[in-house]
Amino acid sequence: MKNILSFSGIFIFGASAVFLFTLSGEVAWAAPMKGNLFEKGSNRQKLLYRFQRNEQVFEGGRTVAKAIFADPSGVEAVVEELTLEGDKIKTYQVHHKQIGEERLLEVKGGKLLFTLTRDGKTETAEEDLPANLVIGPTIADILKKNWDTLMKGDDVVARFASLERKETVGFKFTKDIETSVDGKNRVVIKMKPTSFIIAALVSPIFFTFDKGTRLLLEVEGRTLPKQRVDGRWKDLDADVVYQY
């Protein structure tokens, strides 16, 4: 039986950048997306990691994105690579340098193909492609796509692809609260497992958006990089703040 507590990296880097400038007739670069990961409870005083995402949009609708998470000294912890065809996931790869793991998701012929390499061994798994597939980099996009539904108070359900577990897991997204900061309205969306058993053991993740622009501002919860504790790498719940 798989460890139901093993959900490292549920959240990754969130939303697609929205500003493009053309380099040629065939490719455009999205403005880089940046952010900081702070130790939870440190009042954003203890910086653990920085990240930057760069995205290329090719003629025909193919998008290639790369995100790098590095510690304050610049040492890379995790590198993500994602390829989309339109809004469909084609490949998603995580190079987890901290723990020496390579994780890969491929979508082919109506199937999800998982490959995980660690400790010199490679494991594979497959399952049918769900209609509502989501991964960390596409979470913000699916929330924006279903914004009106969420604002009415209805749930949005999706299957999250956990590369570490080599399977998808059901999650639901719900509007949690609305707040105002410096005169600007914010909306907090909660992500929680649909399984009662898993929900009792896995903490929810909270996404804070600017209500007017729908920009993702903050995330509170599980991240891809880990934290060194007593000589071991532990899953990290952090406060993530985005920069635009």
Image (spheres, rainbow, N blue to C red):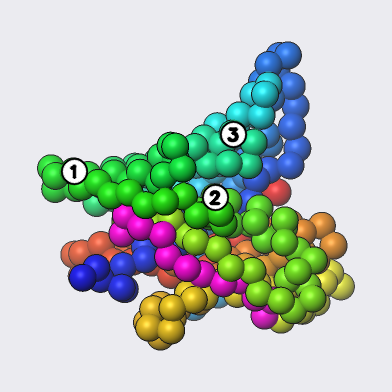
Q: Nearer the viewer, mark 1 or mark 2?
A: 1
Q: Nearer the viewer, residue 102 or 2?
A: 2
Crowding at mark 3 (Cα within 10 Å: few <14, some 14-19, many 20+): some
Crowding at mark 2 (Cα within 10 Å: few <14, some 14-19, many 20+): many
Q: For the residue marked with disc 3, what is the amino acid?
A: Glu
| Residue contact between numbered discs 1 and 2, judged by CB atoms under 8 Å | no
Q: For the residue marked with disc 1, what is the amino acid?
A: Thr
Magenta stretch: includes residue 171: yes
Structural distance between the alpha carbons of marks 3 and 1: 27 Å
Residue receiving disc 3: 85
36 to 19, vertically: above or below = below
Structural distance between the alpha carbons of marks 1 and 2: 24 Å
State the residue at coordinates (51%, 48%): 51
Q: Nearer the viewer, residue 96 or 160?
A: 160
Residue receiving disc 2: 137
Crowding at mark 1 (Cα within 10 Å: few <14, some 14-19, many 20+): few
State the residue at coordinates (66%, 29%): 61
User: Viewed as shown, does residue 181 lie left or right of 121?
Assistant: right
Bounds of the magenta span? 165-176
Quarter where residue 29 is shown = top right
